[in-house]
């Protein structure tokens, strides 16, 4: 018999059963033949027997109701054979392994010893399966009749059980334990970098997976109960120790590279020769011991996230993010640390501002440069982390949120951030975009709007931006109308049309004024007259307060200018009946001709400077006027007169001479024309209206005006809510008002409460008589 035959054998005709003695005699005869055949099969002499003869004898035994004896007999033969194999061949194969642990001269020798032991077991397994195939063919009738009725395993399955219990789970010779240990030793050697026989291990583990075992958890395999549990425990201890050793000796970047390599190795190892049930388990152990157990240290270490962000290590950050996402799906630890680090970088920028600001914030020019530098440094910081977001983090939204939170924190810690951002935009729209392409312009504006998004007090930005925009439009210093409108369009997208209505109205005023002036000049210009260009501003659009208008309306213009002002006013009021014009010289400019010695110059000055200089036309050469006299003659308020005289006598172009010479202007200081003035240029721009950063005093004044505006906004919001609800309790009213106002500024709780009280006093609201925390709207 050389193999498993597939021919169908017809059983002999059933005969009438004989006596017990005859049956016993026939059983002994048949069993003697079968037992000899089974023994010879194990001796590799199966060809000496006829399969048909063996099958008929097994058939007769079962037919004579001796199936149990046949089943037990064949089981005993198989068990005895495997016991012999275990105590002889496998024991001999294991002896070199024991000796090898103490005597192997090289690591390669030790690996070969372990591989030889596995080969011996696999050879025994392979031959056993072959033998059981032959024996089960002979016992097919026993399987169909006796085994089925007696609820016994089939002959082949019984052979596997005997192999498991006799060879692998033997109490006398623990071959199974030795097998598992040999496999673990080979895996440990592979982790250390050695080359091992992977097909050999795969075959060994497949053998264990073939053998079932029943335990308290139900049916399992020898692979799961004997190997997998030990493998996972050994692996956990290995990676726990390796993590402790490596994380203290390597930088975090190097450590993560090692972890990544280990994960790749384990996945490859599991796919190569382990069962599917082990794949995720071993990966989880590596993640737990090498990442999760050291998660905080990996992020907080000096060479961790801090160094990676500072040095912009894209590969390390990408690896860090990918690995930590395995154990921290929401990236809570990473993102929290990232927010703190970026906020700390921003706070350093703020600290630098405060350190230098105390010395320069009262100097407008120095304060402007400080503001521009602050915005540029913040933009550079944002560009750096935006680039890392796209390259290292693959635009992960949770990381983007962490970056947004960090910038929002430190930008709003600077109480002048809104002013600085507006100044930065103003500087670029006046001169910074010259020579740049449309794409470059869009990029600068987009970046600046990104900073605007971080602001909590957007109403503060709105006030500064309208002020700066107004000065650009009135002085004609904007580089491009398209760029201006593009910026407003971006703000409109961010905040809605209500935010930009007044800005768009300012552009409309400029266009209408240009059209009006064309018509006015076409009928008013005469030879020798001074040209006039008046811009009519809608008071609700432009950032001018009533006090500013009232305080600057009494300026005493030169006669020729005053004549044109009256002519334009008459022209305008005839065209637009019912309107009122108020002249505001603080926002105007003038071109005047001046002669110093033999040379003439054309000076572009503010309207106030033109009025002041015109006073010297009435004086003889060398005559002077004091500050008080100039203020009385021009009727310009003292603060504006002082600033104007400083620009004419103390700045770069000294048109006037000051006595005594000093930077400050006092009421008793005297001024006269500087006859010695000279300059290489014939056209000079002096002290035109320029946007500088506010001094500390001016900033405080601006904040006061903004607070007043916020009071009106809060009251309007409260009235809208109550008008819709009619009745609302205190907490809900404050919560809804805070939510609605948060898009423009962060409302103060005390201020909201104060506005509620004010509305109650003015009979817009009333408290419920029964519940004092309940408000009612009064129509």
Image (cartoon, grey):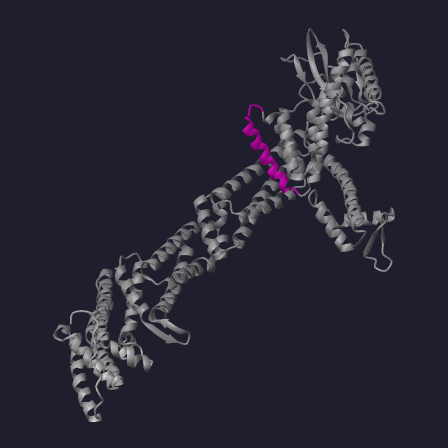
The chief SS type of the magenta part is helix
Q: Tell me which corner region of the image, top left, top right, bottom left or bottom right, holds residue 448.
A: top right
Apparent side of residue 356 relative to residue 388 in the rendered image (left or right)? right
Apparent side of residue 484 relative to residue 13 in the rendered image (left or right)? right
Q: Tell me which corner region of the image, top left, top right, bottom left or bottom right, holds residue 287.
A: bottom left
Compared with 95, 423 (above or below) is above
x and y percent of residue 199 in the render? 26, 60
The residue shown at (47%, 50%) is 321
Please tell me whether residue 444 belongs to the stretch shown in magenta.
yes
| Residue 642 appears in view | yes
Please tell me whether residue 359 belongs to the stretch shown in magenta.
no
The residue shown at (17%, 84%) is 30
Query: Which quarter of the rendering shows the N terminus?
Result: bottom left
Q: Which residues are magenta?
A: 434-455
The residue shown at (24%, 86%) is 64
Compared with 147, 265 (above or below) is above
Compared with 436, 253 (above or below) is below
Apparent side of residue 762 relative to residue 374 in the rendered image (left or right)? right
Q: Given the current orientation, which residue lies at the most extreme left position?
A: 48
| Residue 689 appears in view | no
Compared with 438, 595 (above or below) is above
Number of numbered discs overlaid on the protein picture: 0
x and y percent of residue 12 in the render? 20, 80
x and y percent of residue 175 in the render? 27, 73
x and y percent of residue 680 in the render? 62, 12
Q: Tell me which corner region of the image, top left, top right, bottom left or bottom right, holds residue 85.
A: bottom left
Q: Nearer the viewer, residue 311 or 495?
A: 495
């Amino acid at each position: 018999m050389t193999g498993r035959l597939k021919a169908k054998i017809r059983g002999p005709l059933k005969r009438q059963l004989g006596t017990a003695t005859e049956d016993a005699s026939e059983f002994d005869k048949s069993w003697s033949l079968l037992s000899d055949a089974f023994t010879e099969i194990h001796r590799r002499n199966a060809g000496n027997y006829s399969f048909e003869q063996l099958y008929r004898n097994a058939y007769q035994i079962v037919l004579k109701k001796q199936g149990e004896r046949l089943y037990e007999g064949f089981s005993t033969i198989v068990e005895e054979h495997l016991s012999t194999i275990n105590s002889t061949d496998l024991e001999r194969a294991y002896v070199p392994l024991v000796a090898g642990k103490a005597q192997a001269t090289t690591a390669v020798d030790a690996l070969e010893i372990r591989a030889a032991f596995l080969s011996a077991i696999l050879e025994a397994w392979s031959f056993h399966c072959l033998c059981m195939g032959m024996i089960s063919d002979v016992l097919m009738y026993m399987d169909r009749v006796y085994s089925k009725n007696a609820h016994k395993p089939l002959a082949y399955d019984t052979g596997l059980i005997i192999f498991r219990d006799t060879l692998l789970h033997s109490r006398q010779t623990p071959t199974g334990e030795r097998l598992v240990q040999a496999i673990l030793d080979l895996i440990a050697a592979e982790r250390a970098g050695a080359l091992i026989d992977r097909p050999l291990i795969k075959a060994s583990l497949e053998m264990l997976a073939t053998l079932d075992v029943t335990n308290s958890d139900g049916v399992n395999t020898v692979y799961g109960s004997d190997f997998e549990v030990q493998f996972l425990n050994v692996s956990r201890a290995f990676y726990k120790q390796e993590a402790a050793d490596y994380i203290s000796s390597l930088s975090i970047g190097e450590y993560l590279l090692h972890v990544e390599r280990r994960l790749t190795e384990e996945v490859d190892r599991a796919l190569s020769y382990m069962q599917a049930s082990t794949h995720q388990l071993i990966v989880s152990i590596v993640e737990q011991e090498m990442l999760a157990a050291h998660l905080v240290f990996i992020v907080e270490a000096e060479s961790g996230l801090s160094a990676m962000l500072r040095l912009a290590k894209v590969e390390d950050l990408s690896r860090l993010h990918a690995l930590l996402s395995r154990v921290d799906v929401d990236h809570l630890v990473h993102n929290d640390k990232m927010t703190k680090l970026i906020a700390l970088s921003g706070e350093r920028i703020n600290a630098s501002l405060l350190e230098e600001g105390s010395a320069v914030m009262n100097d407008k020019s120095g304060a402007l440069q400080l503001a521009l530098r602050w915005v540029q440094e913040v933009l550079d910081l944002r560009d750096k982390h935006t680039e890392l977001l796209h390259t290292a983090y693959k635009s992960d939204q949770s990381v983007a949120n962490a970056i947004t939170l960090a910038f929002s924190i430190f930008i709003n810690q600077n109480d002048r951030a809104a002013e600085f951002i507006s100044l930065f935009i103003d500087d670029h729209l006046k001169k910074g975009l010259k020579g740049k392409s449309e794409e470059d312009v869009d990029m600068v504006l987009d970046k600046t709007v990104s900073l605007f998004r971080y602001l909590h007090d957007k109403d503060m930005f709105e006030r500064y931006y309208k002020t700066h925009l107004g000065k650009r439009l009135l002085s004609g210093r904007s580089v491009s109308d398209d760029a201006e409108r593009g910026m407003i369009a971006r703000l409109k997208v961010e905040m809605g049309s209500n935010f930009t209505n007044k800005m768009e109205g300012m552009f409309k005023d400029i266009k209408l004024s240009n059209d009006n002036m064309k018509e006015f000049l076409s009928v008013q210009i005469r030879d020798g007259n001074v040209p006039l260009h008046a811009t009519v501003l809608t008071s609700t659009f432009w950032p001018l307060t009533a006090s500013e208008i009232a305080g600057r309306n009494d300026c005493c213009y030169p006669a020729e200018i005053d004549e044109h002002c009256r002519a334009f006013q008459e022209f305008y009021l005839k065209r637009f009946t019912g309107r009122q014009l108020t002249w505001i010289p603080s926002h105007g400019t003038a071109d005047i001709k001046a002669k110093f010695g033999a040379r003439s110059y054309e000076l572009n000055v503010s309207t106030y400077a033109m009025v002041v200089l015109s006073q010297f036309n009435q004086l003889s050469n060398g005559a002077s006027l004091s500050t008080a006299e100039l203020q009385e003659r021009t009727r310009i308020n003292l603060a504006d007169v002082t600033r104007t005289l400083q620009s004419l006598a103390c700045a770069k172009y000294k048109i006037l001479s000051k006595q005594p010479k000093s930077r400050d202007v006092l009421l008793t200081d005297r001024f006269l024309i500087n006859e010695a003035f000279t300059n290489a240029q014939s056209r000079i721009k002096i002290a035109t209206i320029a946007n500088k950063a506010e001094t500390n005093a001016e900033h405080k004044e601006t904040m006061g005006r903004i607070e007043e505006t916020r009071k009106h906004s809060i009251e309007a919001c409260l009235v809208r809510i109550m008008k819709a609800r009619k009745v609302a309790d205190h907490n809900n009213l404050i919560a809804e008002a805070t939510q609605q106002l948060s898009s423009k500024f962060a409302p103060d709780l005390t201020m909201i409460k104060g506005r509620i009280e004010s509305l109650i006093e003015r009979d817009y609201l009333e408290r419920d008589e029964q519940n004092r925390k309940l408000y009612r709207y009064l129509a």
